[in-house]
């Protein structure tokens, strides 16, 4: 009588099954996302200004980004397979109802706005007349567990509350503050797909239970008119966090010696008033700056502690405003770059 299952055949079958399982785990997507470091990029080749000053625009200023993609099942089980990576749940990357395509569209829209704000902030600092007309409240963050989560996205502009126009952040505050927690309101939002309306119930402010909140962080949305042409082309890289780096390089192009011969990376979303706003992915961005041989890394104050955890000799300078970033860089010793 023949044996159907010899030890050799069982071992072979086990090996084949293991390979098939490994292949499935390696190729099949999970519901999680990986954040991966990307080497810092020189800003100078991406920025063009009208009538640049002689000697302006060295390759000293760099911006950093994060490679973001859906993790495979194997990577979600063993995220350390990818050096410097962080595993995050899909809900943290794409809020409920938002697809990868929609998220990508939002990221690109935020990049375009960050470039416009960077140019405006830099030109104002240089004394140019920049015209700004507010036209709503731009949502820069939506807080988890609060009414706006899943209904409002970062990048949306609130243009009305219950039909009353919102032209500024002050207008929004004035329309929300009379409400009581539990009141239902209708927001009119301007986003990548045009205008839409959403209803939500306000919640109590944790610091004052009598006050109503919806759970968003906003800054002025505005039409900006620049006195000179400034063009920044980052291709398919999205998100708002390169604003600080762009503004520094615009000043370089117009004759200001910002980097003083040093290799400088900067990250931080810029507001129109020059404030530097906290960003995500600081672990990967710090590693990316190191991999590019950067000497100095400017980061928002709120990100500084985490950046230092991964600095490994990279000098971290925390900043709150664009003016402070310029002041801190101006204190660096001038570095001789003569070949």
Image (cartoon, helix red, strand yellow):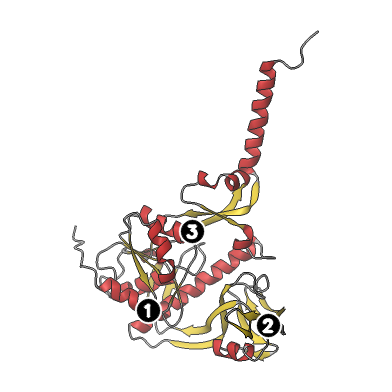
Q: Find residue 287 and report its horizontal and vertical position in percent.
A: 41, 55
Q: Find residue 20 and report its horizontal and vertical position in percent.
A: 66, 34
Task: Please tell me which of labels 3 and 2 falls first in the chain.
Answer: 3
For residue 279, side relative to residue 336 (left or right): right
Labelled disc at residue 187:
2
Q: Nearer the viewer, mark 2 or mark 1?
A: 2
- For label 3, count other residues whose C-alpha is less than 10 Å away and answer few (under 14), some (14-19) or many (20+): many
Does any portion of residue 40 appear in the rendered image?
no
Instruction: Tell me the quarter of the picture where residue 26 sits.
Output: top right
Task: Give the quarter of the figure containing the N terminus.
Answer: top right
Residue most extreme to the right: 1
Give the labeled residue for mark 1. 122
- How far separated are the C-alphas under marks 3 and 1? 25 Å
Q: Could you tell me which secondary element the residue under label 1 belongs to?
A: helix
Contact between marks 3 and 1 (CB within 8 A): the answer is no
Give the labeled residue for mark 3. 66
For residue 126, side relative to residue 29 (left or right): left
Does any portion of residue 291 appear in the rendered image?
yes
């Amino acid at each position: 009588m023949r044996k159907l299952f010899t030890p050799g055949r069982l071992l072979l079958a086990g090996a084949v099954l293991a390979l098939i399982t490994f292949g499935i785990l390696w190729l099949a997507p999970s519901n999680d996302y990986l954040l991966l470091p990307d080497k810092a990029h020189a800003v100078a080749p991406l920025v063009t200004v009208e009538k640049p000053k002689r000697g302006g625009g060295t390759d000293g200023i760099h911006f950093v980004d994060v490679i973001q993609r859906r993790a495979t099942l194997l990577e979600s089980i063993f995220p350390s397979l990818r050096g410097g990576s962080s595993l995050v749940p899909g809900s943290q990357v794409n809020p409920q109802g938002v697809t990868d395509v929609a998220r990508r569209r939002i990221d690109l829209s935020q990049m375009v706005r960050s470039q416009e704000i960077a140019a405006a902030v830099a030109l104002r600092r240089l004394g140019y007349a920049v015209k700004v007309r507010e036209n709503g409240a731009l949502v820069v963050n939506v807080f988890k567990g609060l009414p706006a989560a899943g209904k409002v996205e970062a990048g949306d502009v609130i243009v009305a509350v219950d039909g009353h126009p919102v032209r500024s952040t002050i207008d929004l505050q004035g329309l929300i503050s009379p409400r009581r927690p539990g009141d239902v309101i209708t927001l009119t939002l301007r986003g990548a797909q045009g205008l839409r309306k959403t209803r939500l119930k306000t919640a109590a402010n944790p610091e004052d239970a009598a006050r109503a909140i919806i759970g968003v962080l906003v800054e002025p949305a505005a039409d900006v008119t620049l006195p000179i042409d400034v063009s920044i082309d980052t291709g398919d890289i999205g998100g708002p966090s390169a604003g600080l780096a762009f503004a520094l390089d615009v000043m370089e192009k117009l004759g200001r010696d910002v980097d003083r011969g040093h290799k400088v990376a900067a990250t931080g979303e810029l507001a129109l008033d020059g404030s530097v706003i906290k960003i995500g992915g600081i672990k990967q961005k710090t590693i990316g700056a190191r991999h590019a041989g950067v000497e100095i890394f400017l980061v928002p104050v709120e990100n500084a502690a985490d950046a230092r955890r991964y600095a490994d000799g990279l000098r971290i300078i925390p900043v709150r405003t664009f003016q402070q970033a310029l002041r801190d860089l101006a204190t660096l010793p001038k570095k001789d770059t003569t070949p």
